Amino acid sequence: MNTPRDKASIAAPGMLAAPGMLGAVGQMLDDGLLVADADGRLISANAAAVRFLGEGLVGKQLADVIAHDDVTDLVAGRSSSCTLAYALQTSVAMEFKVRVNRMDDGQIAAILLDMTSQRNLEKVRRDFVANVSHELRSPLTSLAGFIETILLNEVRDWPTQQRFLKIMEEEAGRMSRLIDDLLSLSRVEVDEHIIPDERVPLLEVVKSVIASLEPRAARRQMGIVLVDDRCSQPNRPVMYGFSDEINEVFHNLIENALKYGFEGTDIRIDISALKSGYVTVSVTNHGETVAKKHLSRLTERFYRVDKARSRQIGGTGLGLAIVKHIVNRHRGTMEITSTAEGVTTFAVSLPVIAGDHAL
């Protein structure tokens, strides 16, 4: 007859071999669970532990898998429990909080709590605060400098004062836009889990945004061309959503295309039904090519491909982040592509319901 240790030693990698409740609970855990014998040789690992640490754990020494002096001391009998932070250096850095205990029967159990997401969130929060501080400090410093100069009466001619006041107005406007975008982003993130239930005529919203931005396009000798490719579906696409937020999505995307498209080119808006239950609205401009390494990061807060140019044209670095969260809230998707010829497309796919009769 096999002993409990014999049964544990032949357990398949990735399966918790410990008997009874420990084995059943172990497979339900999202945290990693390792069980070693009294000498520190691993006899079982649940699926989460295998996902974190890799295959072939059974048979290895616990102190080799979790290389830390506290674990070595525990296996040697110099302590009965320890809690430690452990960083796993793989292609993707992972951080764990590890709790190790020697149980009454002599076996050793180790729990690995994945702290990677929490650490990443903390980093994002720190970076966000730092970025906001930087973005606000620049216009504030500029304003303070011009105000001090005027108050000290160092500029006495009206044309120079007028030029200073114009710059101050632009910097104040930049701060106002930044605060508005921060508030908008915060609101959308807080409510992102709430599925909208209002009916929104998608095509009408897009047409309204185009009409509002056509004067700005004309100033740069640019046109905004709307193309409805849904030849077999002449009905108006209607979706569940919030009209103001959908308006903000396409206002930000078309405005972005106007800012970064070359003067004298056209912005093309394509509406198509690529799959059942979804309508895709694509916004395409002709400008500088966006390198592939930047595409996946364009929707990050304050991420800019060209910081100097973005500030020059008045961007806050939050517009595409707002778009991403609104699209997520409406259970849609967005894809960004850019060709070597400088044709950049933002394609937003949104779930729709029936046409006119749904109104």
Image (tube, grey):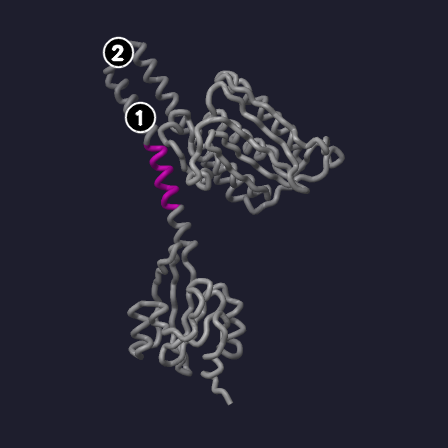
Query: Magenta stretch mostly in which secondary structure?
Result: helix
Q: Residues within 10 Å of mark 1 (few under 14, many from 20)?
A: some
Q: In the image, residue 237 lies at what x, y percent?
A: 68, 34
Q: Quadrant of the C terminus?
A: top right
Q: Amino acid at mark 1?
A: Ser
Q: In the image, residue 326 lies at what x, y percent?
A: 55, 39
**Residue lying at 26% horizontally and 22% vertically, measured from the top left:** 148
Which numbered marker is on residue 156? 2
Magenta residues (range): 125-137
Q: In the image, residue 89 lies at what x, y percent?
A: 35, 58
**Residue lying at 68% horizontally and 32% vertically, measured from the top left:** 230
Q: Amino acid at mark 2?
A: Arg
Which numbered marker is on residue 322? none
Secondary element at tag 1: helix
**Residue lying at 47% horizontally and 25% vertically, measured from the top left:** 261
Nearer the camera: disc 1 or disc 2: 1
Q: Locate residue 155: give its quadrant.
A: top left
240 and 149: which is toward the camera: 240
N-term mark: 1 or 2: 1
Q: In the image, residue 280 lies at what x, y percent?
A: 61, 36
Q: Is residue 86 left or right of residue 247?
A: left
Q: Which residue is mark 1?
A: 142
Secondary element at tag 2: loop
Please say if 307 is above or below 15.
Answer: above
Residue reaching furthest right?
A: 357
178 and 294: which is toward the camera: 294
